[in-house]
């Protein structure tokens, strides 16, 4: 079977910023004539960068879930809240739809994102020819849903800003929140450095 | 090279000019969106951006939430949410919240207006290409819709302990979220450069 014509085989580049299709020029560092962005046939060092960012995210996912994200101090006691115990508080206070929402956004989505990106990265590295369209659709879906994990960081920011009634109650930020924010940021960068087109490269 | 379109997601080359300009097409191989309709009105985009600008000021000028508990009253604004992290020494988290809910949206709105208003009179603003490239970097980091949901979660958690009153900014933030989504879908890179190319010729 004849390989389909691609930008690479025809000597064409596509500008990822303004999406113009351009003829590849022989200069060392080509730039888009329309929006002046740097042009690359493929994103440079895509696999290595994505792998490094993903590894950091996977490691930080552990403290993000184990360390407290928030301390609530009242005159009577001090409570530590991890992401999971926050979900349980919501569940017991009777708002189970919100509890399910936070559970999916904060625990399921980051884990799924790390797993899905690892699968996509591994198959791009192997140049696996199977399920290409499914993998590329999985990647695009994961890229879109990843941002929703920030939900808990925003909820904490508002709780901290509001509950500062010094003598009665006080909410402090825990290091878990920083680890958690870092997981979201790192997975977003991992998705951005990954070049989807590597999924469609011909097998070696 | 207007006769060939290369898919930015899988690099497959397509013959262009098969689809009318009012239709959007998808890549034949990976199903990623390839071309979108490029017949949008520049006036509508400017109107939306101005609307978003007003909503942005409302969202920052008024309190998001007011709570009453044990005789004490507290309120916070959008900036106050980022400031809360800063006051506790978490500068990284403060920056994250500030960039994704305040700086990102205002850069997007102001940057688009800077480019669109001269374009309407068939002129290009100085440094227009640089502003365009900056905005494509900023756009993925605007999380207003996620912030809205986070605010909802915080309200539910607080309502168990205090009387919670949603402020003006919470409503304007909700509408800002819709305005930004509409603005983004009306100023896709393809559409945007269609307007630029039109004023060049």
Image (spheres, rainbow, N blue to C red):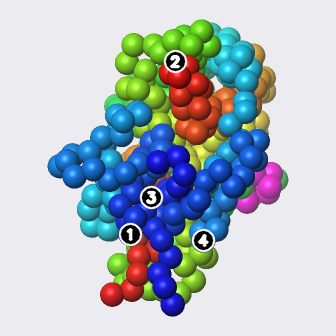
**Marks 4 & 2, CB-CB < 8 Å contact:** no
Percent of width and height locating residue A167: 54, 24
Q: Mark 3 points at which residue?
A: A191
Measured in 3D between alpha carbons, the distance from the residue under mark 1 to the one under mark 4, in whole angstroms, is 16 Å
Q: Name the residue under label 4.
A: B29
Percent of width and height locating residue B197: 53, 28
- Of badges 2 and 1, the one in the foreground is 1
Left or right for B125, reference A96:
left
**Marks 2 & 1, CB-CB < 8 Å contact:** no
Q: Mark 2 points at which residue?
A: B115
Q: Give the range drawn in magenta.
A: A95-100
**Badge 1 element:** helix
**Marks 1 & 4, CB-CB < 8 Å contact:** no
- Of badges 1 and 3, the one in the foreground is 1
Look at the picture and state if A143 lies above or below A3. above
Percent of width and height locating residue A47: 32, 68
**Marks 3 & 2, CB-CB < 8 Å contact:** no
* Same-chain status of marks 1 and 3: yes
In the picture, the disc for residue A9 is: 1
**Badge 2 element:** helix
């Amino acid at each position: 079977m004849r390989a389909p014509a691609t930008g690479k085989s025809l000597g064409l580049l596509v500008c990822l910023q303004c999406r113009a299709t351009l003829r590849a020029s022989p200069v060392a560092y080509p730039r888009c004539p329309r929006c002046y962005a740097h042009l690359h046939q493929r994103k440079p060092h895509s696999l290595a960068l994505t792998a490094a960012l993903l590894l950091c995210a996977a490691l930080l996912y552990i403290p993000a879930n184990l360390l407290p994200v928030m301390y609530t101090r009242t005159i009577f006691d001090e409570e530590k809240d991890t992401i999971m115990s926050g979900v349980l508080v919501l569940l017991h206070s009777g708002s189970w739809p919100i509890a399910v929402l936070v559970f999916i956004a904060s625990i399921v989505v980051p884990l799924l994102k790390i797993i899905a990106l690892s699968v996509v990265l591994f198959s791009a590295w192997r140049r696996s020819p199977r399920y290409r369209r499914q993998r590329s659709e999985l990647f695009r879906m994961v890229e879109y849903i990843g941002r929703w994990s920030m939900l808990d960081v925003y909820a904490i920011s508002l709780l901290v800003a509001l509950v500062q009634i010094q003598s009665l109650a006080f909410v402090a930020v825990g290091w878990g929140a920083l680890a958690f924010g870092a997981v979201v940021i790192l997975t977003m960068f991992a998705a951005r450095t990954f070049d989807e087109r590597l999924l469609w490269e011909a097998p070696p | 090279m207007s006769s060939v379109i290369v898919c930015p997601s899988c690099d497959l080359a397509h013959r262009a000019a098969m689809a009318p300009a009012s239709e959007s097409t998808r890549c034949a191989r990976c199903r990623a969106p390839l071309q979108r309709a490029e017949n949008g009105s520049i006036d509508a985009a400017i109107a939306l951006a101005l609307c978003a600008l007003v909503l942005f000021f409302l969202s920052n000028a008024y309190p998001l939430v007011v709570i009453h508990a044990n005789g004490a009253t507290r309120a916070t604004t959008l900036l106050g949410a980022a400031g809360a992290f800063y006051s506790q020494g978490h500068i990284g988290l403060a920056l994250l919240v500030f960039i994704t809910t305040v700086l990102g949206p205002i850069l997007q709105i102001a940057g688009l207006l800077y480019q669109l208003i001269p374009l309407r009179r068939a002129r290009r603003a100085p440094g227009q290409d640089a502003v365009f490239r900056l905005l494509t970097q900023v756009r993925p980091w605007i999380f207003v819709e996620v912030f809205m949901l986070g605010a909802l979660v915080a309200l539910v958690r607080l309502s168990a302990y205090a009387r919670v009153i949603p402020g003006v900014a919470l409503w304007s933030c909700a509408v800002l979220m819709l305005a930004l989504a509409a603005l983004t879908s009306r100023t896709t890179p393809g559409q945007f450069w269609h307007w630029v190319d039109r004023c060049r010729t």
